[in-house]
């Protein structure tokens, strides 16, 4: 009897076993890869969290730097109390001088007429010591002054309060028919009747008529 040589070819069952083993190995490798991926993801998340914490700590260090400790050297005994230096008070400003205020009243001894010599009495009140001029005017009804300066007094010294002054008056003569008014006038010193100067005070002494 002749023996048949053994065949090198594997049967269908051998091929099926080899494929199953391959599939099992690939499945195991896939599970390994999935596990490794999950591990990598977890590690990445942990690293991100650590970096975030470090970043916050760095920001706080920048915004709130740590103060250097104070080192005290030498004698730590308390300092003596400081004596306040006296302050000199500035002198108060002088009070402003009040505005000059002068008033006058005038009186004649009786009726006057053209060309008459008479005496007028001035009663003057002043709030300052000052030199003034004592004038007198004779106005017609149109306001023209006919006085000639007779009896005017310059450089008269007023004191504070009321003073009475008598002065002579020569009533002008040769006047046109009209009613005339005699006025007492207080002028700045040296400026009686001067153009551009104003009287400091004035008052009516009386009236007379020229027919």
Image (cartoon, rainbow, N blue to C red):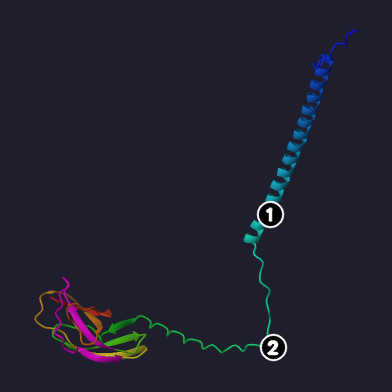
Compared across the picture, whether 115 is left or right of 63 comes to left
- Residue holding disc 1: 54
Q: Nearer the viewer, mark 1 or mark 2?
A: 1
Q: Earlier in the sequence, mark 1 or mark 2?
A: 1
Q: Quadrant of residue 153?
A: bottom left
- Residue holding disc 2: 75
Q: Are marks 1 and 2 in contact (CB under 8 Å)?
A: no
Q: Which stretch did the figure color magenta?
A: 131-157
Query: What residue do we see at 35% from left, 87% from top?
Result: 128
Compared across the picture, whether 127 is left or right of 69 comes to left
Asked whether 9 or 79 is in front, the reply is: 9
Asked whether 33 or 16 is in front, the reply is: 16
Q: Quadrant of residue 136?
A: bottom left
Q: CA distance from mark 1 to mark 2?
A: 43 Å
Q: Which mark is residue 65?
A: none
Quadrant where the C terminus lies?
bottom left
Horizontal and vertical percent position of residue 172: 13, 83
Horizontal and vertical percent position of residue 116: 16, 87
Indicate whether residue 132 is drawn in magenta: yes
Query: What residue do we see at 43% from left, 84% from top?
Result: 93
Horizontal and vertical percent position of residue 183: 23, 80
Rendered view: 69 above or below 163: above
Compared across the picture, whether 142 is left or right of 30 comes to left
Indicate whether residue 201 is drawn in magenta: no
Q: Residue furthest top?
A: 1
Q: Quadrant of residue 62?
A: bottom right
Query: What residue do we see at 28% from left, 88% from top?
Result: 121
Query: At numbered mark 1, what does the secondary structure look like: helix, strand or loop?
Result: helix
Residue density around tag 2, few if under 14, some if 14–19, many if 20 or more, within 10 Å: few
């Amino acid at each position: 009897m002749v023996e048949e040589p053994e065949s090198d070819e594997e049967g269908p069952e051998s091929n099926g076993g080899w494929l199953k083993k391959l599939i099992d190995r690939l499945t195991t490798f896939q599970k390994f890869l999935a596990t490794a991926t999950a591990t990598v993801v977890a590690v990445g998340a942990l690293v991100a969290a650590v970096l975030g914490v470090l970043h916050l700590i760095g920001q706080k260090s920048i915004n709130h730097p740590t103060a250097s400790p104070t080192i005290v050297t030498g004698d730590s005994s308390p300092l003596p109390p400081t004596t306040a230096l006296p302050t000199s008070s500035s002198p108060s400003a002088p009070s402003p001088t009040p505005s000059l205020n002068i008033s006058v009243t005038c009186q004649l001894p009786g009726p006057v007429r053209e060309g008459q010599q008479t005496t007028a009495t001035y009663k003057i009140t002043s709030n300052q010591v000052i030199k003034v001029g004592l004038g007198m005017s004779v106005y017609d009804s149109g306001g023209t002054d006919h006085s000639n300066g007779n009896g005017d007094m310059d450089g008269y010294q007023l004191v504070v309060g009321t003073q009475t002054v008598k002065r002579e008056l020569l009533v002008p003569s040769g006047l046109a028919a009209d009613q005339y008014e005699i006025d007492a006038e207080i002028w700045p010193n040296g400026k009686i009747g001067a153009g551009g100067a104003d009287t400091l005070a004035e008052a009516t002494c009386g009236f007379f008529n020229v027919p």
